[in-house]
Image (cartoon, rainbow, N blue to C red):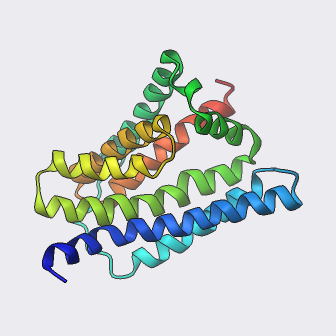
Amino acid sequence: MNDRMKYLIRLLWPVVLFEIITEGAEIAGKTVSSAFFGGEDVPRIILTGSAAVLTALILLIRRPKDREKMSPHDMIMCGGGGFSLAEILNQLFAVTGLAALSSGWNARGAALLDAPLAAKILVIVILVPLAEELVFRDRLFRHLRQKMGFGMAALISAAVFGAVHGDPVQGLYAALIGFAAAAAMDFSGNFFGAFICHAMANLAPILLSALGR
């Protein structure tokens, strides 16, 4: 096995692992929900959260040290940037009609309305962003950043992140959030910059939905 192949395996194995675990949880969640809970989203959300925890635990083992410690200023900038970008993108996708073209986007909206608020906060705002950022920024983006400039590394990691999110509309949204998360990590010098950016981006539609917007 040559060095290039070894590098690709080291680069992509967290993505493959993440996809296997999350897809398995998604299938199991839908099956359990349909068979025992009348199609409610709660079992699916619980299994998705469990999959995120499992992925995070695996990837937290021997993770590289961060370049910098995060300051309160960095936290505010990363979180505020993620929240603001998500709100802008949600409004833009609604106005342009992109959201209406995506069955996954509509299903996401239904899940935001149906699931208990505590479950949404725990899974969608904390556990899923933690697992996804460990995969796509802490591993994939970090390795790419060691080999190339910020723009290309962020673009590649964002494109891969978007590609695993299903249909093109959801993929575009995820890629833009992923690029912002990479920028937050590069700006702060810390993985938690990416996590906070992503978490606040996921919080934005939940919070606005709870407020009736």
Q: Which residue is drawn at the image coordinates 64% and 33% (left, top)?
A: 106
Q: Position of residue 135 (x, y in %)?
A: 38, 64
Quarter occupied by the C terminus: top right
> Where does the image place residue 90, in percent across and percent down from the top left?
50, 28
| Extreme residue toward the left, this view | 148
Q: Residue at x 68, y 34 (%)?
A: 210
35 displayed left or right of 155: right
Decide which of 151, 166 is in the foreground and name it. Answer: 166
Residue furthest toward the top?
95
9 up-or-down from 198: above or below: below
Point 57% across, 32% down: residue: 102
Tell me if residue 149 can be seen.
Answer: yes
Q: Residue reaching furthest front? A: 1
Above or below residue 168? Residue 75 is below
Residue 66 falls left or right of residue 40: left
Residue 57 rendering spot, x and y as whole percentages: 48, 76
Q: Quadrant of the N terminus?
A: bottom left
Image coords of residue 51 (percent x, y):
58, 68
Q: Can the viewer see residue 68?
A: no
Whether residue 167 sits left or right of residue 79 in the image: it is: right
Q: Tell me which residue sits at (25%, 46%) in the image.
A: 155
Q: Nearer the viewer, residue 81 or 16?
A: 16
